[in-house]
Amino acid sequence: MSAWVLPDHIADVLPSEARHIEELRRSLLDTARCYGYELVMPPLLEHLESLLTGAGEALGLQTFKLVDQLSGRMLGLRADSTPQVARIDAHLLNRSGVTRLCYCGPVLHTRAGAPHATREPLQLGAEIYGHAGLEADIEVLTLALDCLKVAQVQAPSVDLADARLVQAMLAGVPVNPVQLAALYAALAAKDSPELITLTRGLPEQVRQGLLALVQLYGDDTVLIEAEKVLQPLPGVREALQNLKQLASRLNNVQVTFDLADLRGYAYYTGARFAIYAPTGSDALVRGGRYDEVGAVFGRNRPAAGFSLDLKALVVAVSPRPLQAAIRAPWRDDTALAGVVAGLRAGGDIVMRVLPGHESEVDEFHCDRELTEVAGQWVVQTI
């Protein structure tokens, strides 16, 4: 095998795409800052028990593991930044009120999440800690939609669900962890035959409610139907009302519901959302409420947030045009060097054409050039 062949689902990012990703990174972090979110930079690797404690346990199979040559302890390369941000909120900041944090950095996965996905996503996200009300859910969802607007995603749609529905329906029902995991997997896959098998032996009302969830997806009529067919338990009513209120705050956005979408069931504790582009089958953004995320760090604070992969986002939107630039000759000329320095200081891109390379094409669109006119260097349109 050639030494320069990269591992499966790992790829170099070439200039045009890299520029697009970097421009998005800056603009999306600026968007989060406009909401009052503070930037944090957690490390790429931590002690394994820190990364995989609590809500992070579900990431065990996705986490690369290695031995620290200094201490001999096991380290992990992060597969998700949210547990790290929860640790920062709990131990390093330890604020009593609301804390808003955002981040952007690479994460590594042992397996790709989809056939053509990368194992090295560039994860950007925002988290809000300390507020249990619906206002926090609305804020992170609104921020996520604003980020997609900045990225020029046209006509995104929001899909809503709530982890409390199944939790309320199974409350007090003896289900072992293996059976529970299988139930959630069957619900997420909408596998009715498997669900029929798995729910044998459960109370009939619970069984019928779980089977009904598989059919409860679509527009807002789903909530009306859910109120009719699901048990009138307090947790069920609260979850449905919460979804109704959340959807009512989204203007000019298509909203759908999938009450059996339980991906990340061990992580989310309330409303959760996925945002899609019109042409894609995979969600560009996932988020919701995960109040238990900081419990393992000693602070069981309310929390909500979202994350997205900038690499996947760039693929989903139109490529950006080449950046305009100024072409300048390569001469040992003090006056020319001064003009070039002044243009660059003002934010212009100035490409010095090296001798013998005048006709080469690059990643910039040179629509102007520096020309000597009557002893003075001036910028002229090409």
Image (cartoon, grey):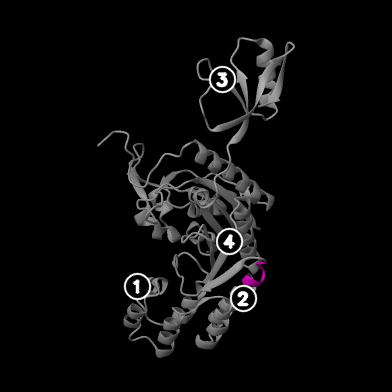
Q: How many marks?
A: 4
Magenta segment = 247-251
Q: Which residue is mark 3?
A: 353
How far apart marks 4 and 1 lie (CA) works out to 31 Å
- The residue at the point 29 percent across, 33 percent down is 3
Q: Which residue is mark 2?
A: 244
How far apart marks 4 and 2 lie (CA) works out to 19 Å
| Quadrant of the image occupied by residue 234 | bottom right
Residue 259 horizontal/vertical position (percent): 49, 75
Q: Amino acid at mark 2?
A: Lys
State the quadrant of the N terminus. Answer: top left
Closest to the observer: 250 or 304? 250
> Could you tell me which secondary element the residue under label 1 belongs to?
helix
Residue 78 horizontal/vertical position (percent): 43, 49
Q: Is residue 87 visible?
A: no
In the rendered structure, are the residues bearing label 2 and label 3 in contact, judged by CB atoms less than 8 Å apart? no
Q: Is residue 264 above or below residue 233?
A: above
How far apart marks 2 and 1 lie (CA) works out to 28 Å
Closest to the observer: 256 or 245? 256
> Could you tell me which secondary element the residue under label 2 belongs to?
helix
Q: Earlier in the sequence, mark 4 or mark 2?
A: 4
Q: Earlier in the sequence, mark 2 or mark 1?
A: 1
Q: Amino acid at mark 3?
A: Val
Give the number of the mark in front: 2 or 1: 2
Instruction: Characterize the magenta stretch by its predominant secondary structure.
Output: loop
Crowding near the residue tagged with mark 4, few <14, some 14–19, many ≥20 C-alpha atoms within 10 Å = some
Q: Which residue is mark 1?
A: 182
How far apart marks 2 and 3 lie (CA) works out to 60 Å
Give the number of the mark in front: 4 or 2: 4
Give the number of the mark in front: 4 or 1: 4
